[in-house]
Image: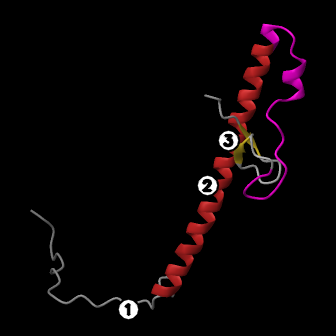
Amino acid sequence: MATVRFVSCTGCHAEISDDRKTCPHCGAEVVPALTALELAATDDTQKGVVKQLVEAERENNRLVGVVNYLKEENQRLQSENTELRKRTGADTPQPETPAQPTTGTQPAPATGAAA
């Protein structure tokens, strides 16, 4: 079974499979996951380091995609919240109600010193 490799789209930064020719989101051309650095590695140590770098780059690209998604979702939720507030009148300032005078007996003032 072949390992599926993912790359970050150069157009929209979405994480997509490297076997695609174009990004399904924005139509940008997909850059192959095999980089010049990978091709230049000659021994096992270099290949190991390059593999770690490539994996770190992929993780970075994945996280950029997650952050972009969360930003879009936050904007969508803020818009929904604003729309709900408009529909329910939650953004309309409510008139202040005047304080009601208290009724009842007031304690009598002290008339002398305590013995």
Quadrant of the image occupied by residue 62: top right
Of residue 30 and residue 62, the one placed in the foreground of this image is 30
Q: Do we see residue 102 in this rendering?
A: yes
Q: Nearer the viewer, mark 2 or mark 3?
A: 3
Q: Which residue type carries mark 1?
A: Pro
Residue 104 location, x and y as percent? 15, 88
Query: If the image is split into quadrants, where does the C terminus sit?
Result: bottom left
Q: Earlier in the sequence, mark 3 or mark 1?
A: 3
Q: Which of the numbered marks, if any, corresponds to residue 41?
A: none
Q: Which residue is mark 2?
A: 70
**Residue in the picture at 18% in, 79% down:** 109
Q: Which residue is mark 1?
A: 98
Q: Earlier in the sequence, mark 2 or mark 3?
A: 3
Quadrant of the image occupied by residue 30: top right
Query: Label 1: few (<14), some or many (≥20) within 10 Å?
Result: few
Query: If the image is split into quadrants, where does the N terminus sit?
Result: top right
Q: Which residue is mark 3?
A: 62
Asked whether the residues under the numbered discs 3 and 1 touch, taking CB atoms below 8 Å apart as contact, a structural biologist would say no
Q: Earlier in the sequence, mark 1 or mark 2?
A: 2
- How many angstroms separate mark 3 from mark 1 (CA)? 56 Å
Q: Which residue type carries mark 3?
A: Arg
- The majority secondary structure of the magenta stretch comes to loop
- SS of the residue under disc 2: helix
Instruction: From the viewer's perspective, tell me whether residue 81 is left or right of residue 98.
Output: right
Queried whether the magenta region covers residue 67, the answer comes back as: no
**Residue in the picture at 65% in, 57% down:** 71
Asked whether the residues under the numbered discs 1 and 2 touch, taking CB atoms below 8 Å apart as contact, a structural biologist would say no
**Residue in the picture at 17% in, 75% down:** 110
Q: Which residue type carries mark 2?
A: Leu
Of residue 81 and residue 44, the one placed in the foreground of this image is 44
Queried whether the magenta region covers residue 44, the answer comes back as: yes
